[in-house]
Image: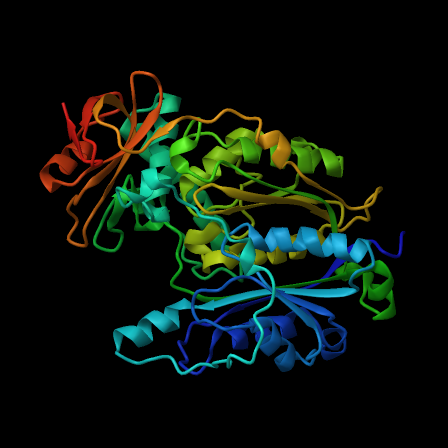
Amino acid sequence: MDPRTPVLVGVGQINQHDDSPEIEPVDLMAAAAREAADPRVLAAVEAIRVVNLLSWRYRDPGLLLGQRIGAPNASTYYTGVGGNTPQSLVNQACLDIQAGRADVVLLAGGETWRTRKRLKAKGIKSDWTRQGDDVAVPPGAEDEVPMSSPAEERIGLLLPSHVYPLFEQALRIANGETVAEHQRRIAGLWAQFSEVAAGNPHAWSQEPRTAEQIGQASPDNRMISWPYPKLMNSNNMVNQAAVVILCSAEKATALAIPRDQWVFPYAGTDSHDTYAVAERHELHRSPAIRIGGRRALELAGVGVDDLDHIDVYSCFPSAVQVAASELGLPTDDPQRPLTVTGGLTFAGGPWNNYVMHSIATMAELLRANPNARGLITANGGFLTKHSFGVYSATPPSAAFRWEDVQPTVDREPTRQALVEWDGDGTVESWTTPFDRDGRPEKAYLTVRTSDDARAMALIDDPEAAAVTVAEDIAGAKVRVHSDGRANLA
C-alpha cells in the first residue's frame, strides 16, 4: 500500500439532550473528538477544519477546538455555508494527505441550536466563548456564493422549507401522480427513514413513525409549506456534533491505530447546479447530481449495484427523490434504504454538519463489514452544491481519485428567468406556506411563459392561496404582474 494512501481512522458523534446552558458548540465538538480518538492521536493532529456553524459566532472555532483537544498548534480552516461541506472537506483532506501537505487532519462540526433557541425563549442570552479581534479569521468562508437570485428575492422565496416543496410538486407532476397518491408515497419513503433512525444509536429521535403519522397534518405535525408537514422537514432543533479524523496509511501505522479501524475513501467529486433556482432547466432534475455522483462511482470502480450502504442527503423528500432518480437508485428497496442514519428529520439536521454524521455512521457500518462499499451524497443550498464520496474498509486497488466535474455540468441547458415580467402563463409548480394556526397564508408559484421561460410569482391573498391546496392547479392559467404578484385565472 502506498504510504500516502488517505485513511479514515476515527469518528465520533455526540447528542446532548439535557440543554445544559453552559455547553457550547465547541464543547460538543471536543467531546466528539475524544470519542473519535485517544489523546495520543489527537495530539498528532496537524490541521483542524470546521464546518460553518449557526448556533454561535466564533472567529476561529478550530483554534478553540485545538486548544481543548491538545492540538493547539494545528492549522485551521472554517468553511462557508452548505450541507455539502463535510464531504467536500473529506475530499480535500484526502488530496492533501496524498500530496504530502498533511499527515493528520481532523474535520469537525457541531451545533447547540436547541439550547440557543430555548435560552432565547426564556429571555436568556447565551454566555459562550467570545474571541477578540486579535484572533485571525481562518480561510474558507470567502468561498461563499449567493444561493438566490433577483427572481426569488423579489417575492421573498428564500427559505429551504419553501423552495424544496416546489421541487416536490414538480416531481409529482412529472410522475403523473395525484396529490393523494404522491403524499402516500413520500410518507412511506419517510417512514422507511424513520425505521432506520430507530435502529441508529446516534439518531436524535429513535421513535419510529408510520407513514400515516408522517403524511397527515396534526397538532403535533403541523403543515409547514404544502405538501410538507413538519415531519417531512429537516429537524434543526438539535444539539449534535460529529468529528472525522483522516491520516496517511504511514501515519496510521506509526500511531498504532488498529487496521480494523481503517476505512478508505476511494473517490470523490464536487459540483454545483445553477445557483439561481429560477434558472434550473427542470425543477425535478439535477445535472450536477447525475454527473457528479456517477463520476464518483466511475472513479472508484464501483457500480450502483455494488453499493451495500447509501446515504442520500435528506433534508426534504424531494432531495432524496431527485438524487435517486439521477443516480438510478430505487427508493423502495427495504434491503437497501437510502439512508444509514435515518435522515435529517429523524437522525437530526444540525444545519451544515449532517453529512459529518452520515460519514461517521457509514464508517462504523463498513468497519463491521469490511467487504461492503458505501456512497455518501451531500447537498448544500437549494439542491445546489453537491459533493460525493465512495468508501470501503477494504484497501482500494488504486489511489484515491477526485474530480471537479463542473465543466461538464456547465454544459447542461438552463432556462431563462424573467424578473420583472407582466403576462399570462401556466403554473409549473407551487408551494403554500401555512401559519401556526394551520391556515394557508400565501403561495409561491413558478410560472412558464408562452416562450418557455420561467417567472417566479406570489399569491399574497390567504383565501386565494387556500385554493392552491384544495385544488391541483398544475398547468392552470395564471396572471403575473410586474411586481411579482399573481392571480389564478
Q: Is residue 95 above or below residue 105?
A: above
Q: How is the image coloured?
A: rainbow
Location of residue 67 by image quarter? bottom right
Q: Nearer the viewer, residue 294 or 200?
A: 294
Give the residue drawn at x 72%, y 33%.
Answer: 298
Q: Is residue 133 above or below residue 445?
A: below
Let me know if residue 184 appears in the view: no
Q: Nearer the viewer, residue 221 or 54?
A: 54
Q: Is residue 393 above or below residue 432?
A: below
Q: Residue furthest left?
A: 463
Expressed as whole percent of the image width and height from the top left, the position of residue 259 reads: 82, 60
Is 53 left or right of 277, judged from the image as shown?
right
Q: Nearer the viewer, residue 157 or 182?
A: 157
Location of residue 300 by image quarter? top right
Give the residue drawn at x 43%, y 54%.
Answer: 346
Expressed as whole percent of the image width and height from the top left, the position of residue 27 reads: 53, 77
Let me know if residue 133 appears in the view: yes
Q: Nearer the viewer, residue 69 or 212?
A: 69
Is 440 left or right of 1, judged from the image as shown?
left
